[in-house]
Image (cartoon, grey):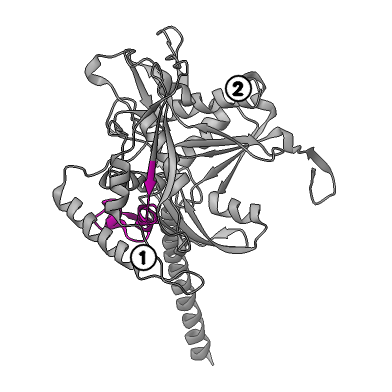
């Protein structure tokens, strides 16, 4: 539709096909044209050939760290698990009947006797990428030959840029990774050449609690480095209400590494209602794996912290099993298929009981997720001073103080002049 100014002069026709929407996340990047019904979902990571020594290798993990070796934390988790289990056993179904649960010992006995079944399929080969090829993107980074020397980066973590002290952890390096991934996705998924970026506009979806410095740098990257025509920023919770057609709502967004909550009214995310929790779906996946091992998970070689395929497998199991439906009682039986390059597919038949609900209850009790401190949430803080930003909070606060002082001086001078004039007039009268 055309944009029209106050004089009813048509300025520019904006086509939804020429607008690209980018929604970056910790694990997945969602990207597409504004005219697309659904966006493309792409693993938000890349692998770069390691040009330094082997001691400088870096491979970001999909799932967050889990306190396997911290006995105190594991004991606190076990107490929380028992409390959640007893609570579920005393809960009622929607028809008023008491819930029933299959004894954990029975489920463990079934899983312990599960026999692996090997399928007669042709094993998938590794993706061999020589050093001259360059970067590897998306799910292909999981297929790389382990012997190749490369680094794996996920540029977004907990809703912010993944800036750290490791190799490739500087702000400049993270922005370079973002630009490489986004350019690759736009070229491959949207069939838009890099030389044509200047004909397109971008809508960048940012978190409700955002770092102004990071947002500024991403905006500069889109406009100056990638050379798009224009860029518009929209907070994810505001975009959610627009998409749902709601004027106001309390939005809860459960992501892979963080959970955010805020209230949106008339297209504005209310700053005093914003809060971000430092845990999300990835933490639930780790807790679910811990619960599966307690009921004799037959896939003993599962190692999500060293193998990307195991991380993806556990994430899929979480999506298939986990729920919060009190009407679903007893054990659920399903087949788990393990697929890895150069190896035959293996199938296990397992049973899962209330573990599927206990893992999700960790969203309401962080102790179940192995989080024992009080530093697991973030609120909207005052932004850092940006002298070149005319809307910077500190700049506005300081200038308002100066203006108030100037006003006080002039007001005092005005009063003195008025009093002097009155006294002089009174004297002559």
Q: Secondary structure at mark 1?
A: helix
- Which residues fall within the magenta stretch? 350-379
Q: Secondary structure at mark 2?
A: helix
What whole-number distance in Å separates the C-alpha atoms at marks 2 and 1?
48 Å
Res 32 seen here: yes
Q: Earlier in the sequence, mark 2 or mark 1?
A: 1
Image point (73%, 34%), residue name = 17
Residue 281: % across, % down: 41, 47
**In the figure, 165 relative to 37: above or below?**
above
Report the disc number at residue 88: 1
Residue 391: say if magenta: no
Q: Nearer the viewer, mark 2 or mark 1?
A: 1
Residue 367: say if magenta: yes
Q: Are marks 2 and 1 in contact (CB under 8 Å)?
A: no
Residue 234: % across, % down: 58, 48
Res 26 seen here: no
Q: Which residue is mark 2?
A: 188
Of 421 and 280, nearer the camera is 280
């Amino acid at each position: 539709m055309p944009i029209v100014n106050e004089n009813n002069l048509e300025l520019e026709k904006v086509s939804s096909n020429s607008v690209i929407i980018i929604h970056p996340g910790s694990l997945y990047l969602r990207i597409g044209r504004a005219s697309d019904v659904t966006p493309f979902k792409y693993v938000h990571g890349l692998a770069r050939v390691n040009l330094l020594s082997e001691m400088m290798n870096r491979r970001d993990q999909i799932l967050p760290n889990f306190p396997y070796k911290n006995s105190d934390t594991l004991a606190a988790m076990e107490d929380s698990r028992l409390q959640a289990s007893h609570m579920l056993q005393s809960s009622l179904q929607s028809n008023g009947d008491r819930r029933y649960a299959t004894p954990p010992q029975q489920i463990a006995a079934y899983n312990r006797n599960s026999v692996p079944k090997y399928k007669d399929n042709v094993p998938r080969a590794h993706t061999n990428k020589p050093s001259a090829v360059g970067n590897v993107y998306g799910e292909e980074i999981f297929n790389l030959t382990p012997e190749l020397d490369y680094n794996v980066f996920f540029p977004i973590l907990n809703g912010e840029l993944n800036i750290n002290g490791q190799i490739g952890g500087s702000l400049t390096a993270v922005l370079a990774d973002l630009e490489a991934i986004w350019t690759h996705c736009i070229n491959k998924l949207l069939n838009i050449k890099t030389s044509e970026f200047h004909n397109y506009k971008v809508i960048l979806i940012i978190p409700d609690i955002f770092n102004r410095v990071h947002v500024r740098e991403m905006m500069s990257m889109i406009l100056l480095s990638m050379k798009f025509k224009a860029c518009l920023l929209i907070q994810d919770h505001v975009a959610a209400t627009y998409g749902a057609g709601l004027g106001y709502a309390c939005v809860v967004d459960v992501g892979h590494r963080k959970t955010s909550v805020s209230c949106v009214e008339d297209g504005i995310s209310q700053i005093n209602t914003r809060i971000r929790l430092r845990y999300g779906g990835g933490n639930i996946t780790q807790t679910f794996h811990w619960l599966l091992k307690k009921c004799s998970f037959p896939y003993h070689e599962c190692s999500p912290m060293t193998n990307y395929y195991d991380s993806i497998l556990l994430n899929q199991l979480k999506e298939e099993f986990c729920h919060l439906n009190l009407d679903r009682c007893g054990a659920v039986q399903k087949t788990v298929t393990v697929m890895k390059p150069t190896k035959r597919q293996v199938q296990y038949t397992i049973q899962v009981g209330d573990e599927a609900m206990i893992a999700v209850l960790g969203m309401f009790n962080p102790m179940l997720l192995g989080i024992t401190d009080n530093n697991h949430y973030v609120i909207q803080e005052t932004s850092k001073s940006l002298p070149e930003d005319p809307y910077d909070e500190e700049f506005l606060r300081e200038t308002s103080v100066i203006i108030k002082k100037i006003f006080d001086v002039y007001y005092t001078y005005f009063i003195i002049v008025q009093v002097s004039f009155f006294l002089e007039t009174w004297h002559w009268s």
